[in-house]
Image (spheres, rainbow, N blue to C red):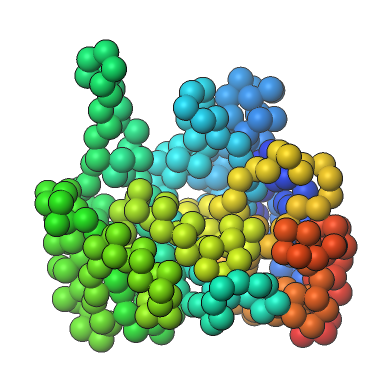
Amino acid sequence: MGIEVVLIKGDGVGPEVSKSVVDILDAAECGIEWIEVEAGLPAIERYGTPLPENVIDIVKDKGVALKGPVTTPVGKGFRSVNVTLRQSLDLYVNLRPVRSLPGVASRYKDVDLVIVRENTEGLYKGIEYEVVDGVVESIKVITRTASLRIAKFAFEYAVRKGRKKVTAAHKANIMKMVDGLFLQCFREVAEKYPDIEADEKIIDNLCMQLVLNPDKFDVLVMENFYGDVVSDLAAGLVGGLGVAPGANIGDKIGVFEAVHGSAPDIAGKGIANPIALLQSAILMLEYLSLDEKAELVYKALCYTLECKGIKTPDLGGTATTEEFTKAVIDSLEKV
């Protein structure tokens, strides 16, 4: 019996990129037994909700899931599946490695940084209400407990991966209490890791510095909203969301997901780029301590892009999703 992993294909291009990744991991003989469940638009049609309770239960039971993109209604309707999963399962870390891929055109070369985003509170706690007609208020929640544990994860990750610096992003010059508490907790944790350089940047300056000099950064840690914005900005440094992996991690559960949207405009056309979900699956393999398999799949991906030059249309190529998948599978024997 293999390692049981919950598979949430999602909607839009989700089923297409999920099939691609499953085929590649199966070809790499990763020993995974896939347990498929529904979320997103298909779940709404069948169950009346985008995230049935049984999905949360089975992910909690198995401890690891791979999730394709899921449509989130804008401004109304159901709550985000992503946010609900993170908060229901206490997946307090959103891990977003940002690394240049060979053969993928971007403005920079050799970008290699990691964003650690607090995943459960801040403005995304979802506490909103109408004060009076025409005036609404959203409350930003920052707690000492969440701030300490996300800072600890960032420093522990730096130690585990041999990284040298952790930078905290904040706006404590303006939001002196909420961001001040986050920064205070960061400083407390930093004192316990004297071999790791601790750095602080005001969030707007950080964004400018990332665009000017991304090579100056290593591990970045920040609260929820900042992390959402900065991680997408950083993805733009290496080719966009189509190549960027993501992971949501708690103490006992990991959900690995493509961070791009469901792209309904190209769904069913067979041209979706599976790299973001594949890179997320590589993170999942590392999480499962299948490091050799993770390295094999990553090398096959790089070989396909750089040596074969096979890419989907969004990256300037002509390959279909199926052709790209086959190329990566064939590359497994060449790396």
x, y percent for residue 328: 80, 71
Compare residues 54 and 187 and report the one nearer the observer. Answer: 187
Tag count in the figure?
Answer: 0
Q: Nearer the viewer, residue 264 or 250?
A: 264
Q: Residue furthest top?
A: 133
Left or right position of 194 against 311: left
x and y, in percent, of residue 191 in the image: 16, 76
Quadrant, the C terminus: bottom right
Q: Residue at x 47, y 27 (%)?
A: 75
Q: Can residue 69 be seen at all in this image of the molecule?
A: yes
**Above or below — where is 97 with respect to 307?**
above
Q: Position of residue 149 (x, y in %)?
A: 28, 59
Query: Is 333 on the left-hand or right-hand side of 52?
Result: right
Across and down, in percent, residue 6 comes to 63, 48
Residue placed at 15% from the left, 68% from the top? Answer: 188
Q: Give the residue displayed 58% in from the left and 29% down from the top.
A: 50
Quick check: 258 left or right of 60? right
User: Residue 327 versus residue 25: which sits nearer the camera?
Assistant: 327
Residue 68 left/right relative to 146: right
Q: Could you tell me if residue 296 is visible in this image?
A: no
Choose between 170 and 155: the one closer to the eye: 170
Task: Tell me: residue 7, above or below residue 21.
Answer: above
The quadrant holding residue 279 is bottom right
User: Dividing the image into 4 quarters, which one contains the N terminus?
Assistant: bottom right
Residue at (56, 80) in percent of width and height = 109
